[in-house]
Amino acid sequence: MHRPARSFAALLAFATWLAAQDPPAPSAPPRPDPELHAAIDRFLDGRFATTAPDEVLRLCAQKHLGPADVEAALRAGRASYPAPPQPPGKLTRP
């Protein structure tokens, strides 16, 4: 009966020591591939005019990129923003 108690005490000591260590630094989010990022923006800008994201799929296959890479590009926001259709301070008319 003494053996489980010693094992528990050793485990408790190890857990206490582990908890006292510095926590690991949070990892930075992955940076998206710039070409994929721009291709996704182009697809989203013309998504109602195109039938499939051919350029995005081609880049993923060519560079061996997976769903995590596409997710990183989507979470990073736009790669670039288009110029506004009117000068600053002016309203767009229909």
Image (spheres, rainbow, N blue to C red):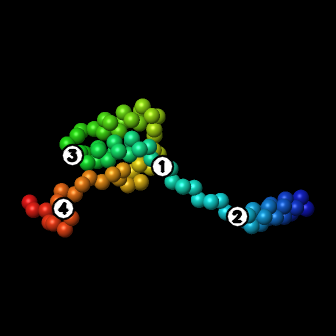
In terms of secondary structure, where does tag 1 sit?
Answer: loop
Is 81 rendered above or below residue 63?
A: below
Q: Amino acid at mark 3?
A: Phe
- Quickly name the residue at label 4: 87
Nearer the observer, disc 1 or disc 4? 4
The answer to whether residue 53 of the structure is visible from this angle is yes
The x, y position of residue 23, in whole percent, is: 67, 63
The x, y position of residue 31, in whole percent, is: 48, 49
Q: Amino acid at mark 2?
A: Asp
The quarter of the image holding the C terminus is bottom left
Nearer the observer, disc 2 or disc 4? 4
Disc 2 from disc 3: Cα separation:
50 Å
Lower position in the chain sequence, tag 1 or tag 2: 2
In terms of secondary structure, where does tag 4 sit?
Answer: loop
Lower position in the chain sequence, tag 3 or tag 4: 3
The quarter of the image holding the N terminus is bottom right
- Residue depicted at x 18% and y 56%: 85
Disc 2 from disc 4: Cα separation:
52 Å
- Residue depicted at x 39% and y 41%: 35
Mark number displayed over residue 22: 2
Nearer the observer, disc 1 or disc 2? 1
Instruction: Tell me whether circle 1 and circle 2 mark residues in contact (CB < 8 Å).
Output: no
Question: In the displayed structure, does residue 43 sit left or right of residue 18?
Answer: left
